[in-house]
Image (spheres, grey):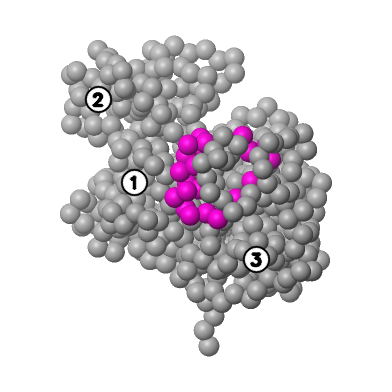
Amino acid sequence: MFSPLTPLDWKRRAVKYYPQKVAVIDGEKEFSYKEFGDRTDQLSAALHHAGIQKGDHVSVMLPNTHYMLECFYGICQLGAVMVPLNYRLSAGDLEYIIKHSDSKMLIVDEEFTAPIEDIQANISLEQIVIVSVAGHETVLKGVDYEAFLEHAAGKTAPPVVEIDENQLLTLNYTSGTTSKPKGVMLTHRGNYLNAANFMYHLGVNYDDVYLHTLPMFHANGWGGVWALTAAGGTHVCLRKVDPPLILELFQNKKITLLYGAPTVVNMLVNEPKAKEIEMKTHPRMATAGAPPAAALIHKAQEILGLNMMHVYGLTETSPFILYCEWKKEFDTKSADEQAAIKARQGIELAFNGEAKVVHADGEEVDWNGKELGEIITRGNVVMEGYYKDPETTAAAIKDGWFHTGDLAVTHPDGYIEIQDRAKDLIISGGENISSTEVEGVLYKHPDILEAAVIAIPDEKWGEVPKAIIVLQPGATLAEEEIVKFCRSKMAHFKAPKAVEFVEALPKTATGKLQKYRLREMHCNGKKKVN
């Protein structure tokens, strides 16, 4: 007997065994698993009635609402492919993705219709479905989401579609920071096994109440859209990252689990209310998207009592390939030592396949925590390739291994720790300087809210580190103080040679730092330092 691996089957199971359990909380709305299942089936019926068939592509641009969750199941159980869109992209990027993805339909939140209004005449969509939002109006031509569901009610039942586990489930586009966005082809099987990793390694269970702080459009919420349903847990939707509201939800909804980039962690620990509330629960919080500073992990555990967990991956790997597994022997270490361990990316997960750090010749680095190499991976969760881009696919997947572009070391216990992105590594006078390492030191300073380190040109050394810093409210620091602080905690050649204070750092919708924008602002003018 063979049953294809697809995360869609977990909805069937949840409806069967937990029909009256609260599945989704979205503001004042609550849906049981039975109600959630009915709504996703209604959406499938409406899509089918509108002509969407197996293999068709449907773009979706929604924040973390129950509508977004419904789309993951309602679209994909038809055998159609969901194309989650980042609602913070420019109109030009959105036009490119909608066209490149061959999307036949778009489902969009009314708050984010402005860029679609600008490009509507340039895109060929059979239909646009709009989720109405109180206080927002659009001139975009389309049908209301609820009316779309109601129009098909009773006219046709959604067909039962035979799923091949190797067919596409979602087409997820990268941010396009250095070129046009690339469409990452993710399968039913890959999503299933990634979500299985999510469940097993993060201990997801029936009693979990999961807060969707991470945008669901980003690598399918890292698998959270599937994993919580599989366990019969409760999804709590969050339209946007709002630290005071998140802390309120911790208390009122008894949140037990959430995900977020280090920037979101930083926002929470620096929220004034964080020191005022008495936490009733100690949620587990997984972080990824950028290497988190050990000092930041320590603050999250000390101030909010969060049980921090570190995972690592890429959109191209569904996304998880490493997990910082916690061992009982680590409990006896100091808080600082524990935070340093939790800042490592860790070891392979149970269901994803193989990952290792290699030299340019493909030989694995020694497990000494010193030899630098690139993380490569192969196995169950790696993408099928980039949509309609065989050349870029061939450049990324060589000899059966996906090359991440992340530079790392492997510690004697096998734990991998990223030192930098290959493009972010600073080579000064022939010495390698990890921007991540310098940022980790900067985050230890109590007056620094956020920090980023990039390379800037230098006539003598080729390039040197520059720190770009956001200070804590009311704090004042001089450039010399920053340099002196760093030199007291690391080799002098690694310390920033220049410092600039800014109001904010550029970030993606998931809170990931956009260093390419910093490089454009600070390096294109070929600024020199003496």
Residue 99 within the segment the image draws in magenta: yes
- Helix, strand or loop at mark 1: strand
Q: Which residue is mark 3?
A: 48
Q: In screen coordinates, is 207 left or right of 387?
A: right
The residue range painted magenta reads 88-115
Among the two numbered marks 3 and 2 on one chain, the one whose residue lies closer to the N terminus:
3
Indicate whether 515 appears above or below 232: above
Indicate whether 417 appears above or below 486: below
Residue in front for this viewpoint, 505 or 37: 37
- Helix, strand or loop at mark 2: strand
Q: Residues within 10 Å of mark 3 (few under 14, many from 20)?
A: many
- Residue 73 visible from this viewpoint: no
The residue sitting at 43% across, 54% down in the picture is 184
Q: CA distance from mark 1 to mark 2?
A: 20 Å
Task: Say what amino acid the circle numbered 1 marks.
Answer: Asp
Q: Are marks 3 and 2 in contact (CB under 8 Å)?
A: no
Task: Say what amino acid the circle numbered 3 marks.
Answer: His
